[in-house]
Amino acid sequence: MRIIVTGLIAQHYTLAGVSWDYIQYCIGLKQLGHDVYYFEDSGEWPYNLDGGKNGDDWVEKDCFKNITYLKNLFDRYGLNDRWAYFFPFSSEWYGMSDRKRNEVLQTADLLINVSGTLEKPWNYDAVKKLVYIDSDPGFTQVKLKLSQGDFMKRVAAHHCHFSFGESIPPNLQDSRYDWKPTRTPIIMSEWAGPKSHNSRYTTIMNWTSYKPLVFEGKSFHLKDIEFIKFIELKRKLKNICFEVALSKLQHKNWQSALPDHFAEEGKNTDISFSTPAELLSHYGWKVVDPTEYCHDMDSYRDYILQSKAEWSVAKGGYAISKPGWFSCRSACYLAAGRPVIVQDTGFDSALPVGEGILSFNTMEEAVEKIVEVETNYQLHAQRAKEIAFEYFDSGKVLQDLVERAITN
């Protein structure tokens, strides 16, 4: 089949995890024998990561770095000249010629809109079937419940709808949409590596990434509040090294205020906690800059392979609504044979939990699961790899996705 995949690879070319999220769809579909293409038409302008010449110009008016990165990535995986990127600033397409791009659009069997990244999916109605992949369950459904106009129009433009939420709760379900469960596809061969590792429990994360939502009196917040609930973990497990590759990009308008006792402790130690990194460091967490440690796809993979395991909280919206979401990043840890100890989001309804994947809701459970991994590490490492093969292998995930999409 001729299949178009959408994404944000060029937009976030400095975030290697984003590249892995989308390129594994393209590689996996190619390996299944499909004629696959990648379109990036998000309507988002690239960032000036350093603020430009005046330090306050955050819109990049030249997309050379973006398209160079995109070209090199697709060349690397034998997908040469199978990408197209729309640059909003100049309303210009790069990559495939206009003729080739239009020919692909007129003849494509499926368009898989991963994370709903297309700005105007109705412009792609020449494709036989448009497939929406909801990678942010709970938040997606709340936005639909809150009747956010442009977002509703974008979701409604698709013929079928899939979600990383494998157990979306009844209060978030909507008769307009039948959310079929799916998972992130992992190219297992890309995550084969040495069994040796360091002693660190790591994760790669943003403190916040967008504005929290409120629905039925509950806050669908981001990771900031959830991490603070477990910030004493390092003090409880002094012999364990916890490391967080934490983005320096702050969204202060979206961050939740620190609880009073954190502010008071900061005063007592002459630390203002002006950044999340300062707060975490004060409580014993090792904080590193992902732009130094995992800035491209290879160093991102190496960072995971060199880790002993992952320990991570989830976004508050996932922890509250329990939609059955499981992280793309955590799936990569599993594929690398690294156990994951992650906050419960309801994924135990779809994935085996207890060996390889360990979930927690409370501080006591988090401590217990880490001690369990320390005690029986080889068992959990082996099960992690086995679970990745069984539940996240791209061949299985994408074959299932395509079959259900075409018969919907």
Image (cartoon, helix red, strand yellow):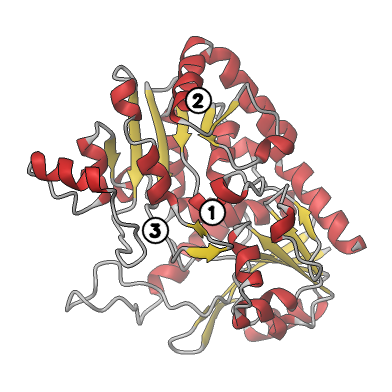
Q: Earlier in the sequence, mark 1 or mark 2?
A: 1
Give the alpha-carbon distance from disc 1 to disc 2, as whole Å: 20 Å
Q: Residue 213: where, in percent of width, then height? A: 50, 65
Disc 2 is placed on an element classified as helix
The image shows residue 130 at horizontal and vertical percentages of 77, 72
Q: Is residue 115 visible?
A: no
Residue 384: image quadrant is: top right
Question: As drawn, which residue projects farthest toward the right?
Answer: 407
Between the residue at mark 2 and the residue at mark 3, the CA separation in whole angstroms equals 35 Å
Which residue does the numbered mark 2 point to in the structure image?
365
Q: Which of 378 and 172 is in front in this view?
A: 172
Q: Can residue 347 be seen in this view?
A: yes
In the image, is 179 to the left or to the right of 25?
A: right
User: Can you name the residue that lies furthest to the front here?
Assistant: 217
- Mark 3 lies on a secondary structure that is loop
Which residue is disc 3 drawn over? Answer: 14
Q: How far apart are marks 3 and 1 (CA)?
A: 26 Å
Query: Compared with residue 311, is residue 176 higher up or lower down, i.e. above or below?
Result: below
Label 1 sits on residue: 317
SS assignment at label 1: helix
State the residue at coordinates (63%, 68%).
116
Question: What percent of the width, then of the height, locates residue 287?
Answer: 28, 40
Above or below, comparing residue 205 to residue 350 in the picture: below
Residues marked 2 and 3 touching at CB (< 8 Å): no
Task: Say what amino acid the circle numbered 3 marks.
Answer: Thr
Q: What residue type is labelled 1?
A: Gly
Mark 1 surroundings within 10 Å by alpha-carbon count, few (fewer than 14), some (14 through 19), many (20 or more)? many
